[in-house]
Image (tube, grey):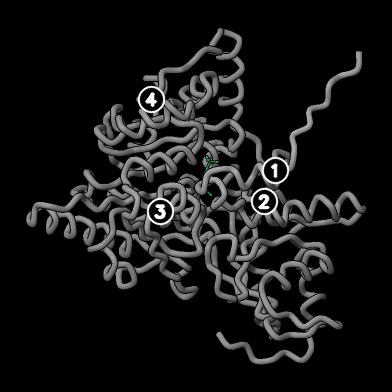
């Protein structure tokens, strides 16, 4: 019998018939690079891929304890629905883990387990925001533009400055706090790899508390909340600047929703386990929304993670090895670009504080390489990919639309040898630059 092949009709007519919400969504600019990398590789090119915000399992494995725990849980039948807010034992284990990391003891009801960090972010936006409410965040940042769109928010974007590691300052945020319903911060940041200075973060938290005191006194305004994305907080490279919000300003407790998870802490992006730390009343409502989405974390993975989080020694051993592997990669990349800058090549680079990213500026606007005059980041990205075979992501993919020449490089899926090779290729390309018009930034 021949199988039936369905005829789905005209795809663009179907797309046009869908909701305005779905038509207004845009896919991440990172995917464009990923597609091109695939095509180039299919054509035989040797591409060094620094565009993936993920871990290559060749270099970064999940902890053995987590792996065995998941296997055991699957074998023992943890294949049905987990309780929607997460396994009680895991919620409890997260409180212990958080206490060891930060000195803050949350109750288990202040923890919600979800399938990775994304459902926390989406559901937190949807739980806090009424359409038209103002959300304040800086660019470049990860995915706030999409969540603001999906929740009908009025997005106020602040362009963060390279001299502040592309993290926002209180001075930049403060004028907008009065009108804001939600402030979103992320540290260590994606795409920047930089962390907020603890003193600055503390000052911002104090401003949030002050603003809420004002609202309470005046009586008719809903609070200003902070959504704090600390997905990269566990990776410790160099002097760890990361702070938990409540460790700095405990009075901010009613207003802070913290997102974290196993994805980046344990190179476990495919396992899909994230968590929210927030006042129990908020956890309950976010949890209801997440449960309608069915976005709870897989049962066996939750059981495996519980075992790991309850074993500080296993975590410490894993941290030592993973942090060293991330650090040596970030450091090699950073040092390589500093050397190019010192040699007068048109690059700038930020010293990474954490995460798996290095921010690189290729100051090439107006430059000529061969026949090509480079007018924008997209042209620079294509040139570096096609001629050096190195894939980078421009900051436009993170909402910084101005042509600043900044790019994200991720070290999660590359070896030290590949980093050395990429540095050599980029140097060679930059040495071919001629006729550099002075840039206007
Ligand atoms: C800053 C940041 N927050 C949250 C997430 C989401 O993590 P998950 O993969 O657990 O959904 C990512 C993923 O790349 C991220 O970079």
CA–CA distance in space, label 3 to label 1:
25 Å
Instruction: Check whether the beta carbons of the residues at disc 4 and disc 1 lie within 8 A of each other.
Output: no
Which of discs 3 and 1 lies nearer the camera? The answer is 1
Q: Quadrant of the C terminus?
A: bottom right
Which of the two labelled residues, at mark 2 and mark 4, occupies the earlier sequence position? Answer: 2
Which of the two labelled residues, at mark 4 and mark 3, occupies the earlier sequence position? Answer: 4
Which of the two labelled residues, at mark 2 and mark 3, occupies the earlier sequence position? Answer: 2
Q: SS class of the residue under badge 3?
A: loop
Which of discs 2 and 3 lies nearer the camera? The answer is 2
CA–CA distance in space, label 2 to label 4:
30 Å
CA–CA distance in space, label 2 to label 3:
23 Å
Q: What residue is drawn where x is 36% and y is 28%?
A: 288
Task: Tell me where residue 241 appears, x and y as whole percent.
Answer: 41, 57
CA–CA distance in space, label 4 to label 1:
30 Å
Q: Which mark is residue 242?
A: 3
Other-residue count near label 3 (Cα within 10 Å), few / some / many at <14 / 14–19 / ≥20 = many
CA–CA distance in space, label 2 to label 1:
9 Å
Q: What residue is drawn where x is 61% and y is 10%?
A: 75
**Which residue corresponds to mark 2?**
52
Q: Is residue 417 visible?
A: no
Other-residue count near label 2 (Cα within 10 Å), few / some / many at <14 / 14–19 / ≥20 = many
**Which residue corresponds to mark 1?**
56
Q: SS class of the residue under badge 2?
A: loop
Which of the two labelled residues, at mark 4 and mark 1, occupies the earlier sequence position? Answer: 1
Instruction: Check whether the beta carbons of the residues at disc 2 and disc 1 lie within 8 A of each other.
Output: yes
């Amino acid at each position: 019998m021949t199988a039936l092949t369905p005829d789905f009709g005209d795809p663009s007519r179907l797309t046009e018939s869908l909701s305005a919400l779905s038509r207004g969504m845009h896919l991440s600019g990172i995917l464009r690079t990923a597609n091109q990398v695939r095509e180039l590789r299919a054509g035989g090119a040797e591409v060094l891929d620094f565009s993936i915000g993920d871990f290559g399992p060749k270099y970064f494995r999940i902890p053995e304890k987590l792996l065995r725990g998941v296997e055991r849980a699957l074998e023992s039948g943890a294949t049905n629905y987990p309780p929607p807010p997460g396994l009680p034992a895991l919620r409890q284990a997260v409180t212990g883990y958080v206490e060891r990391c930060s000195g803050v003891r949350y109750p288990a009801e202040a923890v919600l387990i979800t399938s990775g960090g994304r459902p926390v972010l989406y559901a937190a936006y949807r739980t806090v925001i009424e359409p038209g409410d103002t959300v304040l965040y800086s660019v470049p940042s990860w995915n706030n533009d999409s969540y603001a769109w999906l929740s009908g928010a009025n997005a106020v974007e602040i362009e963060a400055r390279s001299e502040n590691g592309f993290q926002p300052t209180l001075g930049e945020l403060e004028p907008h706090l009065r009108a804001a319903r939600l402030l979103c911060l992320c540290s260590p940041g994606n795409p920047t790899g930089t962390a907020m200075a603890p003193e600055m973060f503390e000052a911002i938290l104090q401003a949030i508390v002050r603003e809420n005191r004002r609202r309470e006194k005046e009586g008719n305004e809903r609070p200003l909340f902070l959504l704090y994305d600390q997905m990269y907080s566990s990776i410790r490279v160099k002097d760890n600047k990361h702070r938990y919000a409540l460790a700095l300003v405990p009075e901010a407790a009613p207003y802070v929703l913290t997102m974290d998870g196993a994805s980046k802490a344990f190179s476990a992006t495919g396992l899909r386990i994230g968590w929210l730390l927030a006042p129990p009343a908020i956890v309950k409502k976010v949890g209801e929304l997440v449960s309608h989405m069915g976005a709870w974390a897989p049962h066996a993975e939750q059981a495996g993670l519980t075992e790991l989080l309850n074993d500080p020694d296993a975590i410490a051993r894993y941290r030592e090895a993973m942090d060293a592997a991330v650090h040596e990669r970030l450091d090699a990349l950073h040092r390589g670009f500093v050397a190019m800058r010192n040699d007068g090549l048109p690059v700038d680079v930020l010293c990474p504080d954490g995460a798996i990213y290095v921010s690189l500026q290729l100051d090439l606007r107006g430059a000529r390489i061969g026949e090509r005059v480079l007018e924008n980041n997209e042209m620079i990205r294509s040139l570096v990919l096609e001629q050096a075979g190195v894939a980078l992501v421009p900051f436009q993919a993170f909402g910084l639309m101005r042509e600043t020449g900044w790019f994200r490089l991720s070290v999660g899926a590359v070896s030290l040898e590949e980093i050395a090779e990429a540095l050599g290729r980029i140097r060679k390309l930059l040495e071919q630059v001629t006729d550099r018009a002075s840039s206007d930034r």
